Amino acid sequence: MPNDMMQQENVQVGQLYTLQLPSKLESITILENLIEEIADKFQIGEDVFGNMMTCLNEVVNNAIVHGNKLDPNKIVIVNAEVDSKKSVWTITDEGPGFDYVHLPDPTAEENLENLSGRGVYIIKLLADQCVFNASGNEVELTFKY
């Protein structure tokens, strides 16, 4: 019996959050409110909070603009599984996806002046883990704290 109790104590109890965001730029405010709520509740430090805010803003903005093409009939689904040590965010749009493997290198000299094309590069730098699904219309970001 004591062994069962010991195993139960080691189980991390996380919380699940879900947003279904309309494909309009104003939806970013709803996302930011959720990130702030989670950061407060789980006492996430400023550095990780900043990384989460930057990455999730970028991913959801891309999902709205590039994935769903600002189509008001399409949604972006944001799921967050959060516990005291990490949060795992999954963002899915209804678009066809993109080729995340063959993106131009934003640090290459010929791309330095470009106004766009740095998002995936930045996300991979700031998140502890970044995994795209095969088609590129879903990404999972992990932040440890």
Image: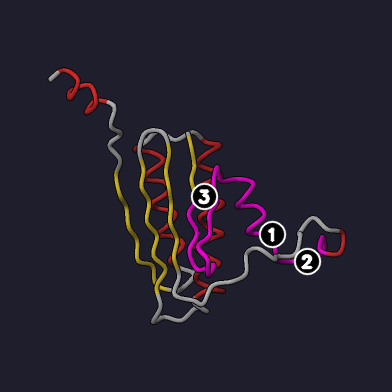
Label 2 environment density (alpha carbons within 10 Å; few <14, some 14–19, many ≥20): few
Secondary structure of residue under mark 1: loop
In the figure, residue 108 lies in which quadrant?
bottom right
- Compared with 38, 10 (above or below) is above
- In terms of sequence position, does the residue under pointer 3 or pointer 2 come before the other? 3
Q: Is residue 20 left or right of residue 3?
A: right
Q: Amino acid at mark 3?
A: Met
Instruction: Name the quadrant of the N terminus.
Output: top left
| Residue at the spot 75% in from the left edge and 64% down from the top edge | 104
Q: CA distance from mark 3 to mark 2?
A: 23 Å
Decide: is 68 above or below 109. Answer: below
Specify the amino acid type for callout 1. Answer: Arg
Q: Nearer the viewer, residue 26 or 103?
A: 103
Residue range corresponding to the magenta coloring: 111-140
Residue placed under numbered mark 3 in the picture: 53
CA–CA distance between discs 1 and 2?
9 Å
The residue pinned by badge 1 equals: 118
Mark 3 falls on what kind of element? helix
Whole-percent x and y of residue 103?
70, 65
**Which tag is nearer the camera, tag 1 or tag 3?**
1
Q: From this viewpoint, which residue is outermost toward the left?
A: 1
Write the residue at 81% across / 63% down: 111
Contact, mark 1 vs mark 2 (Cβ under 8 Å):
yes
Helix, strand or loop at disc 2? loop
Kindly identify which residue carries mark 2: 114
Q: Residue 13 location in percent, x, y?
A: 27, 37
